[in-house]
Amino acid sequence: MNMFEEIEKEKEELPKFQNITKKVSHYKFNGYQKFSIIVFLICFCFGIILGNLFPACGTSSNLYGRCTTTEFNFSLMLFFWFISFLVCLFFFAIGHIISLLTSIDENLRSKSA
C-alpha cells in the first residue's frame, strides 16, 4: 500500500470561513461565558496599560546605576495577558459545562414526560 494514497484518503478539506461563522452564530453564550469574554477584553486593554505604567530598564549607565532609558514592558504585558487568558478560559469552561448540563437536563425531562 502506498503511503501517499492513504494520506489522500484521510485528507480533509479545511473549513471555509462562512461555515465557521454559521456554526458560531448559532451558539448561544450563557452568563459565565459572556462574563469571561468581557473580562478578557478588559484585561487585554489593562495589560497594555500595565506595560506602559511599569516600564522596563532599557539601558543603565553602570552596573548599580539608575536606568538612563526605559522601554515598554512587553514581558509584564504578555504575563498579564497569559494569566488573564487562563482565568477567563476557566470561567468560559465553567459556563460551557453548565450549558451542557442544562441541555442534558432538558433532554432527560423531555424524554421522561
Image (spheres, rainbow, N blue to C red):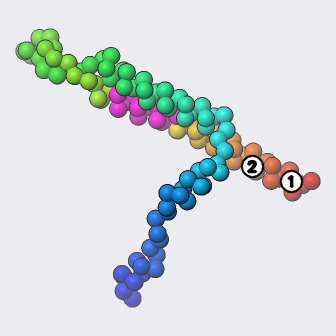
Which label's residue is closer to the chain start, 1 or 2? Answer: 2
Numbered label attached to residue 27: none
Residue at 53% from the left image edge and 58% from the top image edge: 18
On the image, numbered disc 2 is attached to which residue?
A: 103
Q: Determine if residue 97 is in view.
A: no
When the figure is inspected, residue 85 is found, relative to residue 109, above or below; the finding is above
SS assignment at label 2: helix
Mark 1 Cα within 10 Å, few/some/many (few <14, many 20+)?
few
Q: Secondary structure at mark 1?
A: helix
Q: Picture coordinates of residue 31 (x, y %)?
A: 66, 34
Q: Amino acid at mark 2?
A: Ser
Is residue 26 toward the left or the right of residue 40 in the image?
right
- Mark 1–mark 2 contact, CB under 8 Å? no
Q: Residue at x 7, y 15 (%)?
A: 62
Q: Is residue 14 visible?
A: yes
Outermost residue to the right:
113
Residue holding disc 1: 110
Residue 72's quadrant in the figure? top left
Q: Magenta stretch?
A: 77-88
Give coordinates of residue 88: x percent, y percent. 52, 34
Q: Nearer the viewer, residue 49 or 81?
A: 49
Q: Main secondary structure of the magenta part?
A: helix
Direction left: furthest residue:
62
Residue at 46 percent of width and 75 percent of height? 10
Vertical order, 74 against 1 (above or below):
above
Residue most toward the bottom? 1
Number of callouts in the render? 2
Question: Does residue 79 show up magenta in the picture?
Answer: yes
Mark 2, residues whose alpha carbon is within 10 Å: few (<14), some, or many (≥20)? Answer: few
Residue at the image position 48 percent from the left and 36 percent from the top: 86
Residue 30 occupies quadrant: top right
Q: What amino acid type should be assigned to the residue bearing mark 1?
A: Ser
